[in-house]
Image (cartoon, rainbow, N blue to C red):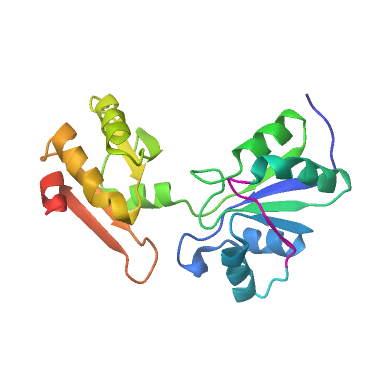
Amino acid sequence: MVKKYTSVLYIVATPIGNLGDITQRALETLREVDRICAEDTRNTRKLLTHFGIQGDLQALHDHNERQKISQIKGWLDAGENIALVSDAGTPLISDPGYHLVNELGNEGYKIVPIPGASAIITALSIAGLPTDRFTFEGFLPAKSVGRNKALQANSKEGRTQVYYESSHRIVATVEAMALIYGDQRKVVLARELTKMFEQVYRGELSGLLE
């Protein structure tokens, strides 16, 4: 279905840490739109305040996304321009927004990407692992049975694998990887990227676990 709409939903990437990484186009978009839909309005307010932007913030997260779609359609139908941001990085990449973009895209609304920071690409760019082909696996299941099953399914994968993991589960995940992939498997762990305490480990799973 193709329709012509004068209003736009902008998908705006924001910094993953260092605020200096925001693009000029992202700043211009956030200043000009009528409303900004944010995963956490408190985090986004800090970003906007830093750059002197007064935006009409609306919460859009995993728990209310489906309910907000009709309201956002109404704003767009009224001629408003909307920006969607996540807490950090590019929206929809392990962040809310899929249901909104999928439905609006199917109905012919105009959706424009404002590219910028992405933790996946940032990590790959410094990893020193093959990047001509890679898979992004997002977050592993929180429980050990599901986590091990997912890793086992990927154990024969020849491409570089990228995972997200929360700090309180990282040890259990590395232990599982060492068991399933073998402790000599080459791995790169990147944390706090672009921030003051950025750390990157390059080596084998055995060394990382230690």
Total numbered badges shown on the rendered structure: 0
Rendered position, 140 above or below 114: above
Specify whether 27 is left or right of 181.
right
Quadrant, the C terminus: bottom left
Residue 2 image position (x, y, % from top left): 79, 27
Please report the residue visible at 69 percent of the width from the left and 49 percent of the height from the top: 10
In the picture, measured across the screen, residue 190 lies left or right of residue 113, that is left
Viewer-nearest residue: 130 or 120:
120
Q: Is residue 170 above or below residue 52?
A: above
Is residue 155 depicted above or below 177 in this figure? Answer: above
User: What residue is drawn where x is 15% and y is 51%?
Assistant: 209
**Looking at the rendering, in which quadrant would you find the N terminus?**
top right
User: Residue 116, how many percent across, how many down?
Assistant: 54, 54
**Residue 148 falls inside the magenta stretch:** no
Residue displayed at 55% across by 58% down: 14
User: Compared with residue 201, is residue 154 higher up or lower down, i.e. above or below?
Assistant: above
Label the magenta part by its dominant secondary structure: loop
Which residue is pictured at 67% across the width and 75% down the height? 52
- Residue 88, given in percent of the width and then of the height, sits at 51, 57
- Give x and y (percent) for residue 62: 58, 45
Query: What residue range appears in magenta?
Result: 55-63
